Image (tube, rainbow, N blue to C red):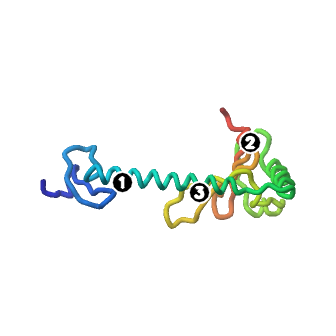
């Protein structure tokens, strides 16, 4: 079948880039090998990301000094987010002025970003999730106030 790029049956294989015409709307790959290779590549990348994230989470060192800083961070967050409030947005300067230490947290979650963008992540400390909202703003969410 000749290649017609205007046809709804025209495809370009996401694995090898081969252009082909299909006979139905469900075919995406030019052959079973490309389909298997593509899916295996995705599976490998996800496994590597999980291993990388797991290693980061496990590498958090807890010391007495960190425990005191953690408690201080929790006190600061309680000042900003009211008892029944789900979330609030504050500036980096406000948190820094209170003495918040961004290096002390319980868990760090990497966020998926388009290639070429700065790596972003959010952290959890106690029942709080802290996320960069913009260049100078931080979003604080209190999970214990989240409706079930």
Name the one closer to the observer, 95 or 58: 58
The Cα–Cα distance between marks 2 and 3, rounded to whole angstroms, is 34 Å
Specify the label residue 85 is tagged with: 2
Count neighbours of disc 1 (C-alpha within 10 A) and say few if under 14, some if 14 to 19, many if 20 or more: few
Foreground label between 2 and 3:
3
Question: x, y percentage for residue 62?
Answer: 79, 55
How many residues crowd around disc 3 within 10 Å: few (fewer than 14), some, or many (20 or more)? few
The circle drawn on residue 52 is 3
Q: Which comes before the other along the chain, label 1 or label 2?
A: 1
Q: Residue at x 60, y 60 (%)?
A: 120
Of the numbered discs 2 and 3, the one sitting upstream in the chain is 3
Q: Nearer the viewer, residue 18 or 41?
A: 41
The residue drawn where x is 35% and y is 50% is: 36
SS class, disc 1? helix
Is residue 147 or residue 17 the one in the foreground? Answer: 17
Real-space CA distance between mark 1 and mark 3, rounded to the nearest whole angstrom: 22 Å
Quarter where residue 26 is shown: top left
The location of residue 88, given as percent across then percent down, is 71, 49
Which is closer to the viewer, label 1 or label 2?
A: 1
Mark 1 lies on residue: 37
Residue that extends furthest to the left in the rendered view of this protein = 1
Marks 1 and 3 in Cβ contact (< 8 Å): no
């Amino acid at each position: 079948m000749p290649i017609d790029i205007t046809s709804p049956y025209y495809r370009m294989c996401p694995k090898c880039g081969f252009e082909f015409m299909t006979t139905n709307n469900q075919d995406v790959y030019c052959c079973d090998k490309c389909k298997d290779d593509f899916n295996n590549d995705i599976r490998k990348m996800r496994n590597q990301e999980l291993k990388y994230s797991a290693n980061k989470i496990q590498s958090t060192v807890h010391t007495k000094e960190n425990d005191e800083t953690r408690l201080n961070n929790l006190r600061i967050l309680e000042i900003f987010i009211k008892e029944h409030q789900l979330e609030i947005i504050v500036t980096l300067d406000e948190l820094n002025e209170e003495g918040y230490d961004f290096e002390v947290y319980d868990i760090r979650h990497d966020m998926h970003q388009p290639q070429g963008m700065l790596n972003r992540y959010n952290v959890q400390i106690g029942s709080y999730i802290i996320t960069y909202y913009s260049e100078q703003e931080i979003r604080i969410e209190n999970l214990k106030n989240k409706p079930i």
